[in-house]
Amino acid sequence: ISIKHAAISSVAGDAYWTLTVEVDADGDFASGAVTVWSQQLGATANSYEVVLTRSQIVAAVATAKYIRVKATKTGTPGTLTFGAFVFPKC
């Protein structure tokens, strides 16, 4: 997964965004979602390459069929603009 975010206004420990990669079996992400990667974002633009193996995903959710990248804010950070792309290995 390739994730890139634009610069944001943040205050360490007070106002920030956290990105998570979650997997789920049924796609509703309400009760069975499990976080397999997480990163608190700094103020400067950045990019992340998240490599997840099938084994890692299955260990988290044995019947995982869905994956999502979620942004969660703490406090009142600046507006977040980000993109995420999944590159499956065939």
Image: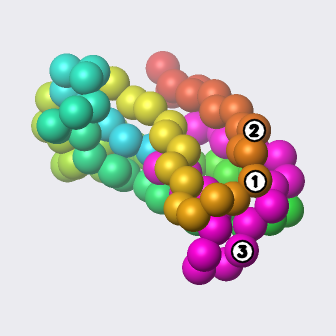
**Residues marked 1 and 3 touching at CB (< 8 Å):** no
Nearer to us: label 2 or label 3: 3
- According to the image, label 1 marks what residue? 78
* Quadrant position of residue 82: top right
Q: Amino acid at mark 3?
A: Val
Residue range corresponding to the magenta coloring: 1-20
Residues at discs 2 and 1 in contact (Cβ within 8 Å)? no
Image x and y of residue 77, in percent: 69, 59
> Relative to residue 56, is residue 8 drawn left or right?
right
Residue 39, visible in the rendered structure: no
For the point 44% across and 55% down, which residue is it?
37
Helix, strand or loop at mark 1: loop
User: How many numbered discs sit on the rendered protein?
Assistant: 3
Label 2: element kind:
loop
Instruction: Give the class, few, some or many, for how many residues have Cα within 10 Å of label 2's Cα (few <14, many ≥20).
Output: few
Q: Is residue 2 visible from the viewing direction of this image?
A: yes
Disc 1 marks a residue whose amino acid type is Gly
Please name whichever residue, 27 or 55, is drawn nearer the observer in this view of the structure: 27
* Circle nearer the N terminus (2, 3): 3
Q: Which residue is the site of mark 2?
A: 81
Which residue position holds label 3?
Answer: 11
Q: CA distance from mark 2 to mark 1?
A: 10 Å
First in residue order: circle 1 vs circle 3: 3
Residue 72: % across, % down: 51, 50
Residue lying at 63% horizontally and 28% vertically, measured from the top left: 85
Is 9 contained in the magenta span? Answer: yes
- Residue 66 falls in which quadrant of the image? top left
Q: Quadrant of the N terminus?
A: top right
* Residue 90 screen position, x and y as percent: 48, 20
